[in-house]
Amino acid sequence: MGEQPVSIERIAEAAEVIDAVFLHSPQYECEPLSAHLGVATVLKVECLNPIRSFKGRGTDYLMFRIEVPSNGLVCASAGNFGQGMAYAARKRGHRVTVFAAVNASPIKVERMRALGAEVVLEGEDFDAAKEAARIHAEKTGALFVEDGALAPIAEGAGTIALELTRMDDPIDAILVPLGDGALVTGIGVWMRRASPSTRIIGVVAEGAPAMELSWHAAKPVSTDSIATIADGIAVRVPVASAVEDVRRAVDDVMHASDAEMIEGMRALYSDAGLVVEPAGAAGLAAVKKLAGELSGKRVAVIVTGGNITPDAFERLVG
């Protein structure tokens, strides 16, 4: 992760210091899903907290670790990372400016503002917004925070794996939605030490395949455009250091189509009563695709976020 490798010791520290509202999220086998898939399916539910996603773990730990300049912080986000940044900054009295694409999810923009972030809509997609954020930071002297490039963000996310390893039964594989790579890196680093036989599989959106292409090429591969409903994992330009980290932490990277993620959203709603956004269902979509290979295995799915309006959910799932 940039300058500093992700560390087991700091993941353990993060589990002690991260705001308790983000820790110890529900983790249990969802028997109706297991029955439908033929795979023992453990859900790690990260959408039941004040920002409805796992991102609060990494942002809270980041702010515990860094010195924040008086000019505050700048980042880019499709919405969930920005909410995590806003929540952690508000708690500590820091200023944060979030750049998001002009077509960013309205509910995510509204929530970032409600949490005290200044939100600037600029650029056609997340990566264009990130470029604008970088320029703004250089101009104002604020600290530019890039999700995927900073070890503490991945270390905070890695606490999810630490919690999963406390379950009574071992886990054969973990399916992890893969955007910029911080989540799967944190989980992979912890599991490599705690449970080396557990397979770590990253799942990208088929319409945003940059990280899958990069993983196979062993170097960053950008795409010209992206086309997916899963804004939370819609990466067009990979973070170079994150590509290396993901290659070390992950056994495989695959993709799920929008239709497969919608089917996953539907299954999580009907079998587990969970309302999740498309990216949050990528892991479950992957289990269904791998059901033959994973048959009889015990598999964990990270349900990463649930920031979606009732209208949008109804439109996709109804």
Image: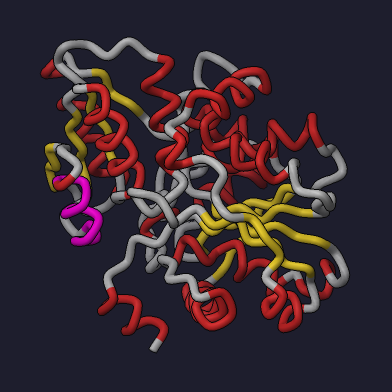
Q: Is residue 83 above or below residue 190?
A: below
Query: Residue 109 lies in magenta, yes or no?
Result: yes
Query: Measuring 68% from the left and 80% from the top, which residue is drawn there?
Result: 32
Where residue 136 sits, quadrant-wise, is top left
Image side of residue 223 versus residue 308, left or right: right
Task: Judge left or right: residue 17 versus residue 203.
Answer: left
Q: Is residue 286 above or below residue 198?
A: below
Residue drawn at x 23%, y 28% as measured from the top left: 74
- Magenta-colored stretch includes residue 75: no
Residue that appears at 28% across and 37% down? 87
Point out residue 157 in the picture as x, y percentages from the top left corner.
54, 37
- Where's the C terminus, which quadrant? bottom left
Q: Determine if residue 231 is in view.
A: yes
Which residue in the rendered view is the most extreme toward the front?
20
Q: Position of residue 63 (x, y in %)?
A: 36, 22
**Relative image position of residue 37 (x, y in whole percent):** 73, 78
**Above-or-below relation of 222 to 204:** above
**Residue 161 x, y percent position in the rendering:** 66, 41
Quadrant assignment, res 306: bottom left
Q: How many marks?
A: 0
Q: Nearer the viewer, residue 3 or 81?
A: 81
Residue at screen point 64% across, 20% down? 7
User: Which is the main secondary structure of the residues drawn in magenta?
Assistant: helix
Q: How is the image coloured?
A: secondary structure
Range of the magenta residues?
104-113
In this rendered view, identify the residue nearer to me: 177 or 83.
83
Q: Is residue 219 visible?
A: no
Q: Nearer the viewer, residue 90 or 204?
A: 90
